[in-house]
Image (cartoon, helix red, strand yellow):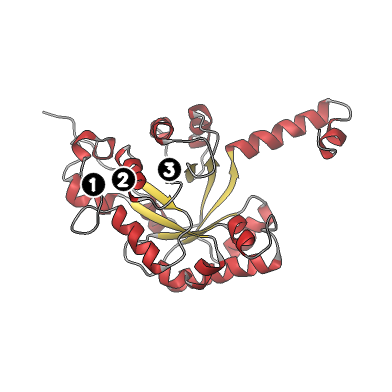
Amino acid sequence: MPFRVAARPSFRDALAEADRPLVGAWISSGSPIAAEIIAGSGLDWTLIDAEHSPIGLESILGLLQAVAAYPITPVVRVPSADATLIKQVLDVGAQNLLVPMVDSAEEAAAVVAATRYPPRGIRGVGSALARAGQWGRIDSYLPRAHEITSLSVQVETETAVRHARAIAEVDGVDAVFVGPSDLAASMGLLGQQEHPDVSAAVERTIADVRAAGKPVGVNAFTPATARRYLDAGASFVLVAADVSILARATEKLAAEWIPGAAAEERAGY
């Protein structure tokens, strides 16, 4: 008799069951070892970033396998809303997706369709050959795939902020994630994600998404910023990345142990 596999709870499930905001960290290096270290840290979730990193389809597979044994919820950010790429990432076993640069309810609905099999959507059928359904070992995967997977979309432009509530109200959008860095750039404030106008736009988005009855998250690498957005009602937050943790920790080591290292760093090498 074939071995049967139960699907793990999705990010949607984790958010619904949580009695506090969920805290996570990025995986941007592509290193399975770094991913496994983060997975065993006690954090609630991790974002495997295939948008701004060297992480491709095969790396996504390896990273998902690296974290699978740990009680952490992995979310994969795809590079774009391309339906073919979304199909491939789902097929390698990404149960939870984050799609960047969604500016309207219409774009959100198209992303939802890309994650669902007909008649609910346009996802191509290949689960018997794919890790998504554990090669036929998850019972009734095809009719249940939309229940097993979760979809978050990213609000990161002025246009998206204006449409945030409508985006959140789209059936099949499970959560909205705010990206302050790109939002700042779209507001003419490149590199100024802590600017008061950007913070106000983030907080307005949090309020609008919550009014739609959906969880909302945000990227915030400084503790004060993270706490401010959590106080504003964010349901989940990213507070660090594997690469930034390594960069800041090694800089601290150099400053502590090498005379003049901190001054050289400030001077730009």
Residues marked 1 and 2 touching at CB (< 8 Å): yes
* Residue kind at label 2, given as amino acid type: Lys
Disc 1 marks which residue?
Answer: 124
Give, as a three-letter code, the residue at label 1: Gly
Residue at 25% from the left image edge and 50% from the top image edge = 123
What residue sits 35% from the left and 49% below the top?
10
Query: Vertical placement of 140 versus 135: above or below?
Result: below
- Decide which of 268, 249 is in the foreground and name it: 268
The quarter of the picture where residue 171 lies is bottom left
Secondary structure, mark 1, is loop
Q: CA distance from mark 2 to mark 3?
A: 17 Å
Residue 78 position in % (x across, y down)? 43, 46
Residue wearing tag 2: 87
The answer for how far apart the CA atoms under marks 3 and 1 are is: 23 Å
Which residue position holds label 3? 74
Q: Secondary structure at mark 3?
A: strand
